Image (cartoon, rainbow, N blue to C red):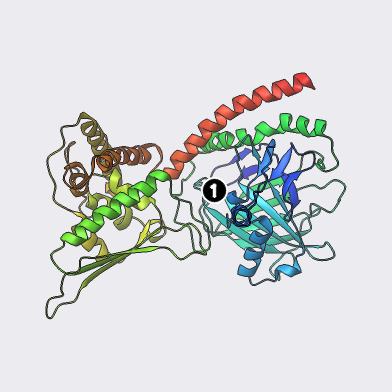
Amino acid sequence: MHARFVPTKHRFRYPLFYVGFPLTQKGSVGNGSFLSIKPSISEIQQAKENGYKIKEWKTAFTVDPSKYLNPSLPFDEKLASILVRHNLNPSDYPHAYLITTPSFLGFCFNPVSYYYLYDRSYTLSAVILEVNNTFGEKHVYFLNATADTNIRPRRGYTFAGTMEKVFHISCFNHRSGSYLVQVKDPLENPKNPQVDMHLTVITAEGVKSMVARAFSVSDSFDILSGGSFRGWKIAAQWGWVNIAALVRTFWEAYKLHKKKTVVYVRPEPLEGSRKREATRSEREMQQLWLAYLKARVMAYPRALEVKVGLPEADPKKTPKEVVFRNGKKVAAGQEMKMLSLRVLNPRFFLRFFANQEVNQTLWLDCTLCSEEHRPVVMEEGTIRELRRLLEGPTTTSPASWTWKAIAKLRSWKTRKEVEASRHLTKTSVPKVHEDEHVNGMDAFYLSGTNACPKARKMYQWKVLYAVVTDVVGFGDAKNVEVYKEILKAGGVTLVASGVVALGWWLL
């Protein structure tokens, strides 16, 4: 259930199907065809090294550890790593359960997962909320049942805690502010576990802006003691609701947009949050962009070194860094010129393909953007130097009709974006060129002398992909992936509806 109070009133609710299990649970649960916990990447790897293979069950519902924080670890080790990061001893929480939405027919919509941590006497000691957004980013919030900042819980809840908002979830909520969370122990009645998590959003000004609540609407079903018949009846009745939930979420977002609700542009994740993985196309664009950068460094007339820190999704890993040096001697009385940039989001590379010129991209994504929205970290002087470095020699437009069509679409998109941003500055705006304009990177890949035919073809399609992503995905390739998921959800919903109809007919 969601209820929004300011600045626009809006209310909706939809069902979700959750499963709960101890974190040490492995493999198939119960009768073997209803639910299974997939092995983690590290478990599969370890089994392979020891010469055996872990059996993966084919079940209606599955929970895959790779879709959660620390994707390579099994759930119990995930929890241990989170607790250590919060300077806590995992042995103080010997009993832990995860309540999450499982995959059904390979599809999963999982906005929030709840980890319930108990001490040796089975007293609820802490709760972890693993929150996902539609951009593929994740963040963990930790609530201690005995924290000094806790307040008196409402009637029916076990404890109530507060936590600062540090993660962007919805474009209709600013990242600032805090949460007030009312927690109910799901094992308060072990014979019929019930979920009830009540969350209030408080703005930075102290105003209650929204309430969200996840709560049980039916009795729980024990997979271990329940029969196969009832399990499959539940699958037929409830499997489709998680598939439809993503479509419903976007429908409610559309209604909020129609109500003229304020939209907040997604900021870059703060330190400690898991960032999204680059898409395959973004990884290919990164390779093409770095190859062009290397060529420009080698062609630079003076001694030059450029360091590029690459995007890294895992907050625990050190980002990889590539360094390009042209090896030219440093003249007497001079120093080697050094440029350094740290890319935070793979979107940074995509934007050089989506716009006509380097100066347009840097103006839109660096000069005009606030620090929290920039996809890259670099000094002001580096922006100017990078622009000069990347503005390579150009050439006439290729005769290919394919490229002419792509270039025309890119010109239209760039002109529209630059004009829409003109009011944000009093300084001059970058020039938008004629439709068939060729920039330095275009010439490098399309001239035929610097790139093989395969790279030339790949470059053309990556430019088209980047432009389309800007037009329909608001500059973020993950949005395009979400659209694919919605289409997939629609298709799977049709299949699931058939399964439900068949289930009712058989039952």
Label 1 amino acid?
Asn
Decide if residue 16 is in sight here: no
Q: Residues within 10 Å of mark 1 (few under 14, many from 20)?
A: some
Check disc 1 and report the residue beneath it. Answer: 133
- Name the quadrant of the C terminus: top right
- Give whichever of 129, 497 is nearer the camera: 497
In the rendered image, which quarter is residue 463 located in?
Answer: top left
Image coordinates for residue 115, horizontal then vertical, percent? 70, 56
Image coordinates for residue 186, horizontal then vertical, percent? 79, 52
Image coordinates for residue 277, horizontal then vertical, percent? 47, 51
Helix, strand or loop under label 1: loop
- Name the quadrant of the N terminus: top right
Q: Does residue 447 appear to the left or right of 179 in the view shown? A: left
Q: Residue furthest bottom?
A: 333
Give the residue at x 54% y 43%: 8
Give the residue at x 86% y 51%: 190
Q: Residue furthest front?
A: 51
Q: Does residue 108 appear to the left or right of 344 in the view shown? A: right
Q: Does residue 30 appear to the left or right of 488 in the view shown? A: right
Decide if residue 188 is in sight here: yes
User: How many numbered marks appear?
Assistant: 1
Above or below residue 397? Residue 186 is: below
Q: Residue furthest top?
A: 505
Give the residue at x 60% y 24%: 494
- Give whichever of 295, 5 is nearer the camera: 295
In the rendered image, which quarter is residue 319 located in?
Answer: bottom left
Image coordinates for residue 66, horizontal then vertical, percent? 59, 50
